[in-house]
């Protein structure tokens, strides 16, 4: 089983939405999506897990790796709607990753911090619903 993903930029905020199950077989695809994010944006990133049905230890480790890669590029990461079957526990050297109950809460938190820009762009895998 794999994941599908969609990346869009709205108001100077990158939103990486992930659907499916983030298990051992899908972790590399998620890391590839993070590479896409790094190549196509400059601002903070919210990883929206609303459509994620679950994640394994390998999936959580891939998310932690994404936080490190994004932080190294000066792009803070936040999570929205983590699956009920686990949480992201950062290591001692990992960046702090704010967690929001859903994407609307993440967007509201970002809006309250300011930062408005215009325009929208979007990329997605072929299996992402239109």
Image (cartoon, grey):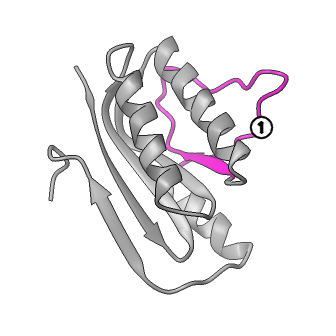
Query: Whole-percent x and y of residue 79?
Result: 57, 44
Nearer to us in this view, 75 or 73: 73
Query: Whole-percent x and y of residue 112?
Result: 71, 74
Q: Is-magenta flag for residue 67?
A: no
Image mark count: 1
- From this viewpoint, is residue 102 visible? no
Query: Whole-percent x and y of residue 29?
Result: 35, 30
Residue, x 56% and y 66% (percent of image)? 107
Nearer to us in this view, 23 or 29: 29
Residue marked by disc 1: 95
> Which quarter of the rendering shows the C terminus?
bottom left
Residue furthest front in the image: 39
**Segment tinted magenta in the rendering:** 76-101
46 over 55 or under it: above or below: below
Task: Say whether residue 21 is left or right of residue 14.
Answer: left
Residue, x 51% and y 36% (percent of image)? 82
Q: Secondary structure at mark 1?
A: loop
Residue, x 55% and y 67% (percent of image)? 13
């Amino acid at each position: 089983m794999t994941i599908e993903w969609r990346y869009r930029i709205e108001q100077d905020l990158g939103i990486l939405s992930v659907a499916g199950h983030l298990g051992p077989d899908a972790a590399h695809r998620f890391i590839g999506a993070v590479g896409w994010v790094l190549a196509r944006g400059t601002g903070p990133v919210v990883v929206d897990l609303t459509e994620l049905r679950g994640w394994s230890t390998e999936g959580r480790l891939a998310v932690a790796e994404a936080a490190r890669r994004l932080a190294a590029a000066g792009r803070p990461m936040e999570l929205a709607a983590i699956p009920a079957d686990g949480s992201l526990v950062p290591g001692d050297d990992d960046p702090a990753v704010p967690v929001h109950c859903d994407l609307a809460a993440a967007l509201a938190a970002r809006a309250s911090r300011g930062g408005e820009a215009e325009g929208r762009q979007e990329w997605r895998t072929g299996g992402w619903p239109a």
